[in-house]
Amino acid sequence: MTRAATSGRPIAPPARSGMGPAGAYGWVPLALMAGLFFVIGFVTWLNGPLISFVRVAFHLTDLNAFLVPMVFYLSYLLFSLPASAVARRTGLKRGLALALVVMAAGVAIFAQFIAWQSYSGALAGLLVLGAGLALLQVAINPYVSLLGPPERAAQRIAIMGVCNKFAGMVAPIVLGLLVMRDVGGVAARLAAAPDPETHRAILGGFTRALHAPYLGMAILLVIAAVVVLRSSLPDLEVETVNARLSGAAIPARLWPGIAVMFLYVGVEVMAGDAIGTYGQGFGLPLDQTKFFTALTLGAMLAGYLLGLVVTPRLLSQERYMEVCCGLGAVLSVLAWAASGYVAVLLVALLGFANAMIIPALFPMAIRGAGDRTALASSLLVMAFCGGAVMPQLFVALTPLCGFQAAFTLLVLPSYLAIMIYGLVLRRQGDTQVPVADTAAQAML
């Protein structure tokens, strides 16, 4: 795990157990971290309605429209290790600010190329945005663990997770109301346009509607970067070696852990970003399906809050993960058997099942890595590219077996694989891990 230092000396978190979750640094740094987790959730979960937006704006097939999550999550594979190197060079505080500036650049590039009606340019903007998010994740994780006593880390992570999930629920609603109010009508008018000039005029108005909100978001990200630099956040540096842990080889459990993390993120993106396409498969109108991502994130927020109550009072976090996987498997089968709004609701409820999987899975996989923990964490973050691959497999399988069967064929085995991974480690008696090992569990 990464450590922090100022003036070359390690900083230990406050040790007084009577402190609140903010510890010795006060509430301002914790509130700033919560705000950044809100930003992460907001920009991440805009992808769901963006799939519908680009499908209409560029008259795309599902395969091409799903390049939106593919490019976005591919950035985790490409930039996680370089982001770690950048954070070591800049320090955490400046790394946070740099990440926000890179994200602002990505958002602005995306908006400008959308206005110019260039899909390839817009995808490049998403790749830049993803690079900024990778750096933000590398820089923000240590703060959540270090801004207070270790025994209160779970409480701080809970605050971060709630902010992240709430933002994910709000983002599709905001985009739907500000930019895509009449997306169904726009699609109909484009189809009925009598000539290319009318078609271009309709399309130009639709794409320009996204330009101003996204530029506004880019400006807010730059302002956030300035706030971070001028804030009271401690100026920490990343150490490549955790001096508290003895040297260790990468544990054997990490490699299957990377595989199931790949599957998990793919499942989460399927439930959140592909749900709109899933609903459209039943002929549901675009003006409704654009909000379906918010349903999934609302269910995820509820699952996260319930998990915080249940674990560890009634069930261990690891055992609860197995229960969640079982619930996800059952819901995926029921969604395949149902139709219409009922099937969509069942897919949205996968968010409830997904909520508490990564809080157990991430630290379970990196346990025992010793001074390789930072590398192990980066490899797990790279596995987030499952969110790039699984939606593309969904689109490719749909013509062969139908969209409902394709969805279940991908999601059901993934839940079972994650459950088996947890069961094997738990039966080996090797799953109990400190929740403070990482804050990445609150990122998705």
Image: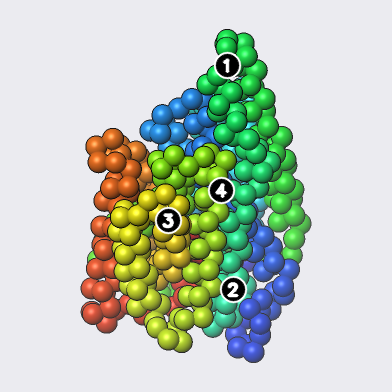
Q: Is residue 51 left or right of residue 423?
A: right
Marks 3/1: CA distance? Answer: 35 Å
Disc 2 target residue: 156
Q: Are marks 4 and 2 in contact (CB under 8 Å)?
A: no
- Alpha-carbon neighbours of circle 4 within 10 Å: few (<14), some, or many (≥20)? many
- Alpha-carbon neighbours of circle 2 within 10 Å: few (<14), some, or many (≥20)? many
State the SS at label 1. Answer: loop
Residue 348 percent coordinates (x, y): 46, 57
Disc 4 target residue: 291
Disc 3 target residue: 342
Marks 2/1: CA distance? Answer: 53 Å
Q: Is residue 28 left or right of residue 442?
A: right
Q: Earlier in the sequence, mark 2 or mark 1?
A: 2
The kind of residue on which mark 4 rests is Phe
Q: Earlier in the sequence, mark 3 or mark 2?
A: 2
Residue under the point 45% across and 81% down: 311
Residue 406 visible here: yes
Q: Earlier in the sequence, mark 4 or mark 2?
A: 2
The kind of residue on which mark 1 rests is Ala
Comparing 127 with 302, the one in front is 302
